Amino acid sequence: MAQRTFKIWRGNKDGGEFKDYSVEVGPGMVVLDAVHRVQAEHAGDLACRWNCKAGKCGSCSMEINGKPRLSCMTRLNSLPEGTVTVQPLKTFPVIKDLVTDVKWNYEQNKRIAPLKPKPRDADGHHRMMQEDVDRVQEFRKCIECFLCQDVCHVLRDHHKHDQFVGPRFMIRLAQLEMHPLDTADRIPAIRKEYGSGWCNITRCCTEVCPEHIGITDNGIIPLKERVVDRYFDPIAWLLNKIRGKK
Amino acid sequence: MADLNEIQTLEHDVLVIGAGGAGLRAAIECAARGVNTGLVCKSLLGKAHTVMAEGGMAAAMGNVDARDNWKVHFRDTMRGGKFLNNWRMAELHAKEAPDRVRELEEWGAVFDRTRQGLISQRNFGGHRYPRLAHVGDRTGLELIRTLQDHGVHQGIHVHMECTVLDLLKDGDRVCGALAYWRDTGRFVIFKAKAVVLATGGAGKAWRITSNSWEYSGDGLAMAYLAGAELMDLEFTQFHPTGMVWPPSVRGTLVTEGVRGDGGILKNKEGKRFMFGYIPAKFAAETADTEDEANRWLKGDKSARRPPELLTRDEVARAINAEVKAGRGSEHGGVYLDIASRLPAEQIKRRLPGMYHQFKELAEVDITKDPMEVGPTLHYFMGGIRVDAESQMTTVPGLFAAGECAAGLHGANRLGGNSLSDLIVFGKRAGAGACDFAASAQAPVIDKDQVEASMRRATDILNRESGSNPFVVQDKLQDMMSHNVGIIRTKSELETAVEKLKELSAEAATAKAHATSQYNAGWHTALDLRNLLLCSEAVTKAALTREESRGAHTREDFPGEREEWVKYNVIIKRGNDGDMVVEKRQRPAGPQPLVEIANSKIEDLEAGKVGADYQ
């Protein structure tokens, strides 16, 4: 077994610094294993979130060598040799060490109106064809790791938290908008309350998604198109005026 | 020491502890009844262990095979549980699961569909018909996200990253809990008229486990200390297929859905060995040739099921025996092959999670090569003893649902019966707690109890020096894996009892450095008490049950003993504080249910048995 150095950010909301820790690494180890080893051997109070350790719960998000990743799915042998830098997500306020305050995301979810399903068929079933739910299921793979929120320029660099819900919740909206049973009209809110116009399609969110969800192409762009069709298509615009729709 | 007025106090009619499927479903039920409901979770909302469930939730909807109904599901559950299940719970579960699944669809769940557009159902071990509503191999995520997204609109007060230390009592009844916020380390008192525990099992006491750090048996230990009875704890399920390589993911779950979709188990000689391990009880309903097993997979209704889909206890023991006989794989497991059974595209579509898990963590492409798998501690069939209808424990006002409750699964749980358990009995526990709270007096918090609990927690930080909690946990995991594993004997179990005393002494002096803010060492030290209590209860129950039944295998007492089906092993805290183990006679099952469970499947389906019982 070889030793490897991990440069881990230690601190809280008042500030902090990187500290070096050297631990033994073995075959198949991931960054989260190394963090656990640091906890057990050098720094028992090192704060880090984790749960499933299999890429299914989205708890252990952090920035590894500057990139937002799930630490449980980042194998050490996939990183360039030498020191590994580990730090908390930049977009959210630090609580302690690698743990950030992601409450804002939960507040966004609460703003989104739930599914408003149409009535069941006479025999008590809802019928939906697999090909009609494939896209919705793609969005529902989301594990809420918030890596997309972390990397989104609108949030990370421009801090438009009050105007844009971020990619995670754009695909939550897309998932409801494309749900075959949903009867709610979500387009006005997608434009005005959730800020679909803010996304400028850099696809950074799609790149970091550990579930490989086509966030931009399959989710956000179609929503933008639906907004455009409703509000900026001249014929539709005229019809809306006549019907008094907003 | 403590001035109660200085400690943050939150008041709810019902406090639900644990926010996996059972806890969320219980909280939703309470909120739907207009009750002030608090929901406490150790992690962020939506991260609880339910998220890891893969294969599906069992509900006899009959969408894929119309022959299915609640009686067949009930019969499968009883047979899988080796007839030790609580009869009424198994009945309620089989009857109510379909409605609970349909309700999820109403709340936004999007299950995989049949060609007719209905909820699709897949085959699983021990289930006679395709019965598991599923979404690829991420059904748990679908369940928890659906409940979460629905729940946040119901007015539930969600308290995230909050760990409960102890239940508080007002006389005989429970009246709340003391907890701390992980992000600040500050204490909080919850006052409540009724408390629902939905805290899962204690798998983290073992080295090789599919369970996360959260599975430290908090609910079991807190209920025990509050005077509740525990039951059936000797039955710890070893899931047959956990990953075995690389070491850092050893134990991580590989869904039974792989076998449900046609995957087969082979030893290092390439032999499909499960045909050699078919127990007499299941012989009539299991294929005895590869040809027949393959025909079944293609949908031939006259063919019998492949032996890879025997119940989990049988498959886990078979794998264990192959490895012990020197026919294991390179890293001490066996091979699970789906690559030669399904086209690559179908594997990726039906088992996307497994495809990525192996690709990214083990550098194995499961569409080309077999997986290496071996048994991993997965689930506690035993838990807190509850009333079947209301889920109330033996402590007034204290309820339990999901994995931390005992009864439904008997000696062995069928795959897919856990997710349905969560929603059926989560709802019932919520209803039970509301009913209790409606007629309960306002709770009174006892200062001494709060102080004692706070002192236990702060001592860990305040003592000058002591043992390293990570090291103690590590030793416990090795010790339990070695002495209280899949095959048990008296001498090893007795060794475990002795070692647990030593480890408890070490844990009592555990030291955590620095402050109480989000301190991993402190959290680990606090969890040790619960892990050790659960380990002791499992070990002592395993010593008491002198037979092999379901997931409990005693090398020194092979085979089921007719006598023992009449008893549960009950554990409770004695007046002197010592653990008391009791062999307690079970009430006989209601006659119609006994007849259904013991019937030949042909007789049941022809209406010769149980036709009048609805």
Image (spheres, coloured by chain):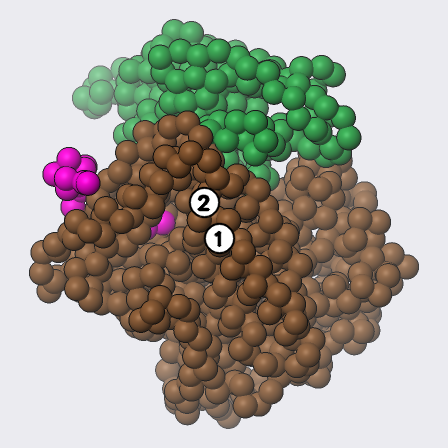
Q: Residue at x 48, y 66 (%)?
A: B537
Q: In which quadrant of the rendered image does the N terminus of chain A lie?
A: top right
Q: Is residue B34 visible?
A: no
The image position of residue B54, as x and y in percent, is 56, 50
The numbered dot on residue B135 is none
Which chain letter goes with mark 2? Answer: B
In the image, which residues are magenta? B1-18
Observer-nearest residue: B154 or B247?
Answer: B247
Q: Residue at x 50, y 92 (%)?
A: B608
Which chain letter goes with mark 1? Answer: B
Q: Which residue is mark 2?
A: B509
The image position of residue B43, as x and y in percent, is 40, 39
Q: Is residue B511 visible?
A: yes
Observer-nearest residue: B237 or B537?
Answer: B537
Q: Residue at x 72, y 58 (%)?
A: B262
> Cβ–Cβ below 8 Å for labels 1 and 2?
yes
Chain A: colour as depicted: green
> In the displayed structure, does residue A22 sit left or right of residue A116?
right
Colour brown belongs to chain: B
Residue B87, picture quadrant: bottom left
The numbered dot on residue B505 is 1
Q: Secondary structure at mark 2?
A: loop
Magenta segment includes B13 = yes
